[in-house]
Image (cartoon, grey):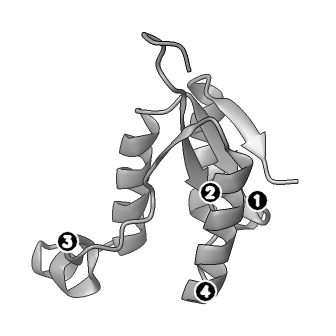
Amino acid sequence: MRKGTTMKKAMLSQPMAGKTDKEIIETRERAIKALEGFEIVNTLFADEWYSREAMESRGVIQIPLCFLAKSLENMSLCHAAYFCKGWENARGCRIEHEAAKAYGLEVIYEE
């Protein structure tokens, strides 16, 4: 990359419901490999702040909606959104897809 140029940023949108941690990680690794040349913006919120107990103690009632809100916030940092296979069957991914299209992000699909 030339000096003074900014690397494009991308987020991953992947279905997680009903998937094992291993399946989620394998899907993420494939997506990251496919997005070579992009800086990946985190949309996997696994730290203590996002544990069920911590969110409930903060009064979060709709936990999946909290994750979606954070994901959309991180989308604001991106040039592109990468949609993993099965995205069209996952409520949050479909919303992320509509937002990405509506706000002009480059939309990339897993082959």
First reached walking from the N terminus: tag 1 or tag 4: 4
CA–CA distance in space, label 1 to label 4: 21 Å
The numbered mark at residue 22 is: 4
Look at discs 3 and 4 and give the one toward the viewer. 4
Q: Secondary structure at mark 3?
A: helix
The residue under label 4 is which amino acid type?
Lys
Residue 49: assigned label: 3
Q: Residues within 10 Å of mark 4 (few under 14, many from 20)?
A: few
Residue 88, label in figure: 1
Residue 19 appears in view: no
The part of the image, by quadrant, that contains residue 100 is: top right
- Give the residue at x 37% y 52%: 69
| Disc number placed over residue 93 in the picture, else none | 2
Label 1 close to label 2 by CB (< 8 Å): yes
**Quadrant occupied by the N terminus:** top right
> Which one is in front, 92 or 22?
22
Foreground label between 4 and 2:
4
- Residue at x-position 43% and y-position 57%: 68
Name the spot of residue 97 as percent of width and height, x first.
65, 44
- Determine crowd level at label 3: few under 14, some 14-19, many 20+ residues with C-alpha closer than 10 A: few
Per the model, the C-alpha gap separating discs 3 and 4 is 22 Å
C-alpha gap between disc 1 and disc 2: 7 Å
Q: Amino acid at mark 2?
A: Cys
Instruction: Using the rendered view, name the quadrant where residue 80 is placed.
Output: top right
Separation of disc 4 and disc 2 at Cα? 19 Å
Q: Amino acid at mark 1?
A: Glu
Decide: few, some or many residues near mark 1? Use Cα within 10 Å; few <14, some 14-19, many ≥20: some
Q: Residue 61, percent across and down?
A: 27, 74
Closer to the eye: label 1 or 3: 3
Mark earlier in primary sequence (1, 2): 1
